[in-house]
Amino acid sequence: DIEMTQSPSSLSASVGDRVTITCRASQDIRRELGWYQQKPGKAPQRLIYSASTLHSGVPSRFSGSGSGTEFTLTISSLQPEDLATYYCLQHYRDPWTFGQGTKVEIK
Amino acid sequence: QDQLVESGGGVVQPGRSLRLSCAASGFTFRSYAMHWVRQAPGKGLEWVALVSYDGSKNFHAHSVRGRFTISRDNSKNTLHLQMNSLRPEDTAVYYCARERGHYGLDVWGQGTTVIVSS
């Protein structure tokens, strides 16, 4: 199975800060990776697919990059509504696998 | 509006069975592969199973293989998860989600809660 290692597990940042979350795959997954946002008490929602394409309606402060084994989710200017846990998900090979999640808190 | 609504969750004793359902509306259900994802209390997301658009292929996570079975009824626009030999560690919110091929899971339900406890 492909293991997804996500870091950090949590972070605290101020409004306006730039935030970066990293996901590393245990093998080459090309660009078969998405990022998902889960707000407290809610179902997950897709933010980004194919490593870097924004889902419709997602604010442009979110961006994704990477390919192969290293991927990054960046929030260019953190907003209060970005309080959530973020997960990467690889779908290059079955079984699909999530990263452990990154909980983003606002200072 | 594309929508998924899960049902069938509840409290069940260890070793017993439960069947979850996911009703789809607003899109052509038979055209999409479908997935189940779960989240134990206070934990991260865990992928559980997938079924192809026509039901001919399925794949289950190691943690549920041999106990859970994903299936679908395209005539009723419904996805199912048959869960047998339930264990306390299966306690979780179970989400169904629609797959968009290389584009991941683009529509999610609101989840249904399963509690396995004596």
Image (cartoon, coloured by chain):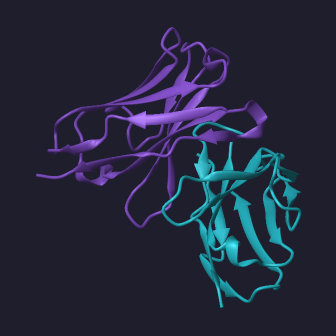
- Quarter of the figure with residue B30: top right
- Residue A97 falls left or right of residue A92: left
- Quarter of the figure with residue B101: top right
Q: Position of residue A56 (x, y in %)?
A: 82, 47
Nearest the eye: B42 or A57: A57
Nearest the eye: B66 or B1: B1
Extreme residue toward the front, this view: B1
Q: Position of residue B43 (x, y in %)?
A: 44, 64
Extreme residue toward the top, this view: B75
Q: How many tags in the picture?
A: 0
Image vertical order of residue B17 relative to residue B93, above or below: above
Tell me what residue is drawn at x 86 percent, y 68 percent.
A61
Image vertical order of residue B17 relative to residue B118, above or below: above
Image vertical order of residue A78 relative to residue B14, above or below: below
Q: Position of residue B45 (x, y in %)?
A: 52, 55
Image vertical order of residue A65 relative to residue B24, above or below: below
Tell me what residue is drawn at x 82 percent, y 85 percent.
A16
Q: Position of residue B69 (x, y in %)?
A: 39, 26
Tell me what residue is drawn at x 63 percent, y 49 percent.
A2
User: Chain B is shown in which shade?
Assistant: purple
- Residue B114 falls left or right of residue B6: left
Nearest the eye: B61 or B29: B29
User: Chain A is shown in which shade?
Assistant: cyan
User: In the rendered image, which quarter contains the N terminus of chain B?
Assistant: top right
- Residue B50 falls left or right of residue A21: left
- Residue A26 falls left or right of residue A53: left
Nearest the eye: B77 or B46: B77
